[in-house]
Amino acid sequence: MSDRLSVLPQYLLPKQALTVFAGWVATRRYGAMTTWLIKWFVGKYQVNMAEAANPEIASYPSFNEFFTRALKPGARPLAGADLICPVDGAISQFGAIVKDQIFQAKGHQYSTTALLAGDTALAAGFEDGQFATLYLSPRDYHRIHMPCDGRLLRMVYVPGALFSVNPTTARGVPGLFARNERVVCVFDSASGPFVMVLVGATIVGSMATVWHGVVNPPRGGTIREWRYDDEQVELKQGDEMGRFLLGSTVVMLFPAGTMGFNKSWSPARPVRLGEAMSDISYIAA
């Protein structure tokens, strides 16, 4: 079956209703039933609880608290690179932005302007730059960390669809990451501006940032923006910046000439928080 045919049911599913329901279930504190659900999830997705700061499944009062669990101190040492991988997951795609076009999958591209909710001025700063799209599966650690030191400038909530973001859907739904609900975070750094886009998906009940808390819900049909020009929201490399409920995707944009990727990276390769994302020899040069 082709990827386009395999994702056809997603166009018909009541994705928002399913997502709202999943978010509601994830916050419930049902004692033994919650523990059973977490045990089932750990077994189905082979979650490595030995890495968790709290490995005791029965101690989590809700699925949300289990899913956004912290790691043990030292579980993800930071590489000596200017840019580190901000998540555990897998590389969906990465590489050069061609003018304003980002490669999604064979036969599919989308524009930086579409990803950034029509902000042509912001998108222009990443023309011919670099991008990385990282997919977080249900088994992964779901906190998102900073790839480098950064100062927050803006955050924008963009309403949208709630397609799955797994690899099959990325191959089958045109413009997927610019169609789904997302939170655009714009930072400044020593090497210039960069953007981290947290992309929602079916069953992703919420996205949150450390400076704002839960961004969605509430959901609505309008773009919402927060500016931080007069606030000093500064985060260090490796600091937590946000988190997802259930699997989703982070898309990062960097300006032209500011970085080169780790030469060991390739599409579909697993990645871990803290490993080198930038090529050290490129940065040093």
Image (spheres, rainbow, N blue to C red):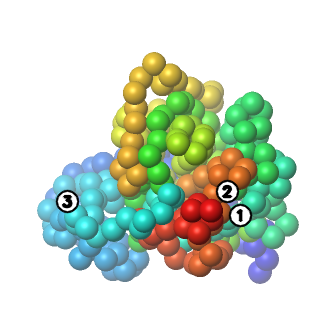
Query: Which is nearer the eye, 233 or 180?
Result: 233
Tell which circle, 3 or 1, labels the residue nearer the N-terminal end. 3
- Vertical comparison of 68 with 170: above or below: above
Query: Which residue is depicted at the point 79% across and 77% down?
Result: 2
Task: Label 3, secondary structure: give it.
Answer: loop
**CA–CA distance in space, label 3 to label 2:** 36 Å
Query: Which is nearer the eye, 93 or 23?
Result: 93
Confirm or deny contact between disc 2 and disc 1 (CB under 8 A): yes
Place of residue 200 in the rendered image (x, y in percent of width and height, measured from the top left): 55, 50
Q: Which mark is residue 95?
A: 1
> Which residue in the structure is indicated by mark 3?
60
Give the amino acid type for the residue marked by disc 3 in the picture: Tyr
Q: Residues within 10 Å of mark 2 (few under 14, many from 20)?
A: many
> Which residue in the structure is indicated by mark 2?
131
| Badge nearest the viewer, 3 or 2 | 2
Give the amino acid type for the residue marked by disc 1 in the picture: Gly
Tell which circle, 3 or 2, labels the residue nearer the N-terminal end. 3
**CA–CA distance in space, label 3 to label 1:** 39 Å
